[in-house]
Image: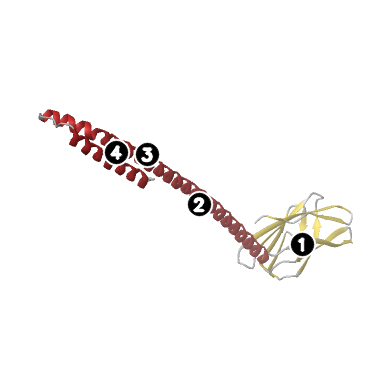
Amino acid sequence: MKDKRFWFGLLVTVAWLGFSGYMVSIYAHPKELDAWGDYFSGLFAPLAFLWLVIGYMQQGEELKHSTEALRLQAEELRNSVEQQSQLVAVTREQFQNEYEALQDERELRREAARPRFVPQHSGTVVSSGVTTYKLKIVNIGNTATRFRLAFGDAIEVPKHHNLAVVARDEVIVIELRFVLTAVSQGVIRYIDADGLPGEVKFDVQAPGGNKLIIGDVVRVA
């Protein structure tokens, strides 16, 4: 389009100059200097106007092209921002998933290092009017050291039961005598296989007769 306008302007300019030269050759020339100025002004004014219009049209087209280029750049920038936002979201989600997986793995390792104590009632013996309840505690988890078991006021014997080591699958048998029918609490403190302290507790009650009620083991630490 630019070349067409240029060649059109050039063609018109050549034709106009040829026409002007012909007019100058057949008509009388001006005698005064001012008249020559008016003559040349009238001669070249149409050409100046023509090239002004051509330049204006060319600038308009270039401005249109510049506007389109800016629009395309803005579109590319918007797409780039969206892609970066999506990448950040994916990266954040991936990091969160990896963090949760790491936390789960860490918790699994911690759980594998802990002992798991399961208290059970293994029998009741009545002798000379004294009732003794046998409490069996089985360690189905990892080895524990510095095992410390303490009972509340409702249990007369024993108040404490301590062991240096409780291995995996080891069974501890304790004979309990109650002075009250109220609920007593057993608290076990230990050091796990990772060398970290832990604590669990459970309720135990002898409501009367041969029955011994044992609650669920709850992890405290």
Please tell me which of labels 3 and 4 falls first in the chain. Answer: 4
Residue 56 image offset from top left, x and y in percent: 33, 37
Label 4 belongs to which residue? 51
* Quadrant, the C terminus: bottom right
Name which quarter of the figure residue 14 lies in: top left
**46 or 22: which is nearer to us?**
22
Per the rendering, the mark at residue 84 is: 2
Which of the two discs, 2 and 1, sits closer to the camera? 2
CA separation, marks 2 and 1? 53 Å
Per the rendering, the mark at residue 118 is: 1
Please tell me which of labels 1 and 4 falls first in the chain. Answer: 4
- Residue at 33% across / 39% down in the picture? 54
Name which residue type carries label 1: Val
Name which quarter of the figure residue 120 lies in: bottom right
Residue 200 image offset from top left, x and y in percent: 70, 57
Please tell me which of labels 2 and 4 falls first in the chain. Answer: 4
Label 3 belongs to which residue? 60
